[in-house]
Image (cartoon, grey):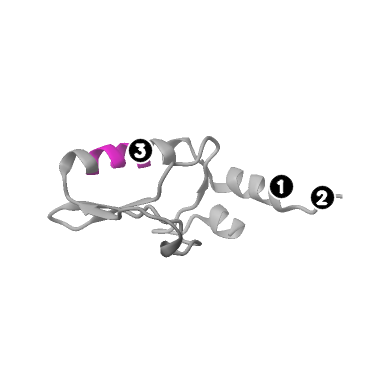
Amino acid sequence: MTDLMESEPIGLQFGLISGAELNGPFMLLRTRERASLAINPFPTDSTPNAQSGVAMITSAEDAVMTHQRIAEATWRDAIKGQAAAKQMRALLAPKG
């Protein structure tokens, strides 16, 4: 993971969020004609039957634009490249 952070291959970018984590996962899906927003309230490591929630897919412009701004701001403030790799290595280094 740290090697990918340092090399920053085209089409694949990783960063570390330095502030609070987003309160819910979402994905912006784009085609040439339109953008859609997909929201899934269930963490990927949980069983859906253990909780209740509503997943959603929408092309509503206000929802897509709001989440686009959130994604852009989060990416702008994320630690990227060599600085992210250095911090990740420090976090994963054995304590002792």
Q: Earlier in the sequence, mark 3 or mark 2?
A: 3
Discs 3, 2 touching: Cβ within 8 Å:
no
Q: What range is drawn magenta here?
A: 64-71
Locate residue 78, reporting x and y percent.
49, 40
Q: Nearer the viewer, residue 30 or 43?
A: 43
Q: Nearer the viewer, residue 66 or 76?
A: 66
92 relative to 69 in the view: left or right: right
Instruction: Report the residue that reaches farthest toward the left.
Output: 33
Q: Earlier in the sequence, mark 2 or mark 1?
A: 1
The kind of residue on which mark 3 rests is Ile
- Residue 78 lies in the magenta stretch: no
65 to 6, vertically: above or below: above
35 to 72, vertically: above or below: below
The total number of labels drawn is 3
The kind of residue on which mark 1 rests is Ala
The kind of residue on which mark 2 rests is Lys
Numbered badge on residue 62: none
Q: CA distance from mark 2 to mark 1?
A: 10 Å
Locate residue 37, reporting x and y percent.
25, 51
Discs 3, 1 touching: Cβ within 8 Å:
no
According to the image, label 2 marks what residue? 95
Locate residue 66, reporting x and y percent.
27, 37
Tell me what residue is drawn at x 52 percent, y 41 percent: 17
According to the image, label 3 marks what residue? 70
- Residue 68 lies in the magenta stretch: yes
Secondary structure state at the residue bearing disc 3 = helix
Q: Residues within 10 Å of mark 3 (few under 14, many from 20)?
A: few
The quadrant of the rendering that contains the N terminus is: bottom right
According to the image, label 1 marks what residue? 90
1 relative to 9 in the view: left or right: right
